[in-house]
Image (cartoon, grey):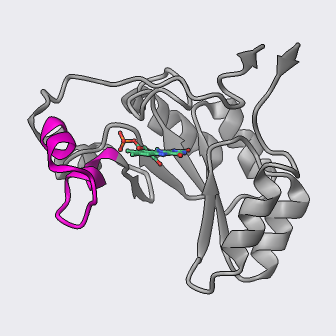
Amino acid sequence: MRELLGWTEATAGPLVQTALKHDKVKLIANALGTPPANIVKEIQDTGRMVAALCGSVKHALSHKEAGIDIIICQGGEGGGHTGEVGSIVLWPEVIDAAAPTPVLAAGGIGSGRQMAAAMGAAGVWAGTLWLTTTESDCPPVNRSRHTLMPPTVILFALVPGPENPVVF
Ligand SMILES: Cc1cc2nc3c(=O)[nH]c(=O)nc-3n(C[C@H](O)[C@H](O)[C@H](O)COP(=O)(O)O)c2cc1C
C-alpha cells in the first residue's frame, strides 16, 4: 500500500481549529504541501495569513495558485525534509516563479551574512538558529552541539510528507 502523509481532514483539521482558537496566532504555516482551498479561505476569513513551505518551483506554483499569502522556500539545508535542492540554487528560482507572492528564504540560515545571501526574498525563516538563543529551552548539551558544530555539517532528516512519500 502506498500512502501519502499530508493534508487530511483528520490530521490537519483539528490542528487548524486549535490554532484558530488562539487570538495571538496571526499566521498559520505548514510543510505538508498546499493546503486545501477551503482551509486557506477559512483561515484568511479570520484575518490571519497562511504560509506554506516549498522545496521546488512546482510546489511554489501550487501554493501560489491556491492563494497562499507567504511562500517559504526551503533548500535542502533545512534538514532535507522539503527537498534536496540547495538553498542558494532554489531561492532565486522560487522568488521569480512565485512573484508577486512574497517569499521567505529558509534552509541553513545561521547568520546575517546568510540572510544577506537571500537577496530578493521578502525575509528569512530560520529554525535551528533559534535553538542557540538564551530563550531556547534546548538543553545546554544540545545547544553547544549547534554552536560548536562546523558550519559545513548538514543534518538531514527524512520526515514523511508530500515531498517524501512513505511506502508501507
Ligand atoms: C527543533 C526543530 C523542530 C522542527 N520541527 C518542525 C516540524 O515539526 N515541522 C516542520 O515542518 N518543520 C519543522 N522544523 C523546520 C523549521 O520550521 C524550519 O523550516 C527549518 O528549521 C529551517 O531551516 P534551518 O534549521 O536550517 O534554519 C523544525 C526545526 C527545528 C530546528
- In which quarter of the view is residue 155 placed? top left
**Image position, residue 11 (x, y; %):** 79, 49
Q: Residue at x 88, y 52 (%)?
A: 9
By secondary structure, the bulk of the magenta-drawn segment is best described as helix
The quadrant of the picture occupied by the N terminus is top right
Region rendered in magenta: 128-145
Q: Residue at x 63, y 33 (%)?
A: 57
Coordinates of residue 125 in the picture (x, y in percent): 41, 53
**40 to 36, vertically: above or below:** below
Counting from the top left corner in percent of width and height, residue 24 is at 56, 84
Residue with the most extreme bottom position:
23
The answer to which of 136 and 126 lies nearer the viewer is 136
**Per the image, is 36 magenta?**
no
Q: Is residue 100 visible in this depiction of the protein?
A: no
Q: Is residue 28 above or below residue 112?
A: below
Snapshot quadrant of residue 101: bottom right
Decide whether residue 133 is among the magenta residues: yes
As drawn, 148 above or below 80: below
Is residue 23 toward the left or the right of residue 37 in the image? left
Quadrant containing ligand 1 reads top left
Residue 104 appears in the figure = yes
Residue at the spot 48% in from the left edge and 22% down from the top edge: 85
Q: Nearer the viewer, residue 71 or 151?
A: 151
Picture coordinates of residue 141, whole percent (x, y): 15, 42
The image shows a total of numbered marks equal to: 0
Q: Answer left or right for 42 relative to 53.
A: right
Q: Quadrant of the C terminus?
A: top right
Q: Is residue 117 left or right of residue 59?
A: left
